[in-house]
Amino acid sequence: MVALYLIRHGQASFGADDYDRLSATGIDQARVVGRQLGARLGGGDLTAVSGSLNRHRDTAGACLGAMGRDSVALGVDPDLNEYDPTDVIACYRPDLADAAALRAELAATPDPRRTYQILFAEAVARWMGGDHDADYAECWPVFRNRVLAGLARAAQRASGGSGTVLIFTSGGPIMVAVQAVLSLDDAAARQLHWGLVNGGVTKLLVPSRAVGQVGPGWSLSSLNEQAGLDGPDGLLTYR
């Protein structure tokens, strides 16, 4: 049996010129998750893989360091990367394709984060809807299939078809994983996506006979665990 721990990256730099770097809160989140996982997993055999984005790799580094597992080599697989939110929004609202235009529109509202979430949810619904696939650099079916391929390869990293694999990724790939395991429709998958927290841990169990393909036999053990993040320190974030 292989245990996959899908770890959403720590909070990135929302509203900054470079979103793809962890905020100070994001680093703290990754360390909290690392301490929790270190106590839970002990010193057993461990494999780690991340997407290629900075926020994935930096979350992995802070998490593994807090676990005392700095010596674990981190594999990198771009198929575990997030979809491109800039492209998804630009195809829905071409007038907001420029980052400066998007920031200006959000800044003119009383609650920029809430305004962005509403806009983003509408844009993602269009992207997943299937009527405009040709508009996107990476349409929903292509994204889903490449994430599933990356997850299967991650499971195969476990030695001899058993062991523990930490996967540092984003909310979109975690949505894809849970959708595949639970056979959710797209609307239900989107709702799940919006509830995933930064640093949240989702655990999948994979029988050794099924490591090569996400699907029958894979099971969901836990979803969006938040231990250590939901206390008084203000570490519970969604974006």
Image: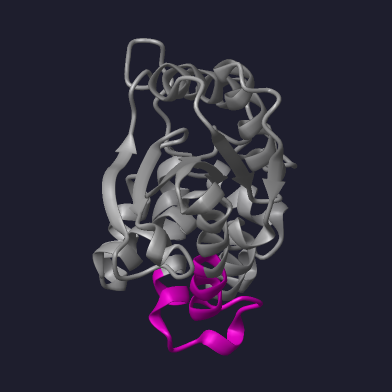
* Residue span colored magenta: 125-148
Give the number of callouts: 0
Residue placed most toward the observer, 160 or 83: 160
On the rendered structure, is 231 left or right of 104? Answer: left
| Residue 224 screen position, x and y as percent | 33, 40
Residue placed most toward the observer, 191 or 108: 191
Residue depicted at x 42% and y 50%: 117
Residue depicted at x 39% and y 70%: 125
Q: In which quarter of the image is residue 193?
A: bottom left
Is residue 196 in sight in this rendering?
no
Residue placed most toward the observer, 203 or 103: 203
Q: In which quarter of the image is residue 14?
A: top right
On the rendered structure, is 129 left or right of 173? Answer: left
Residue depicted at x 39% and y 66%: 210
| Residue 115 screen position, x and y as percent | 43, 49
Is residue 227 in sight in this rendering?
yes
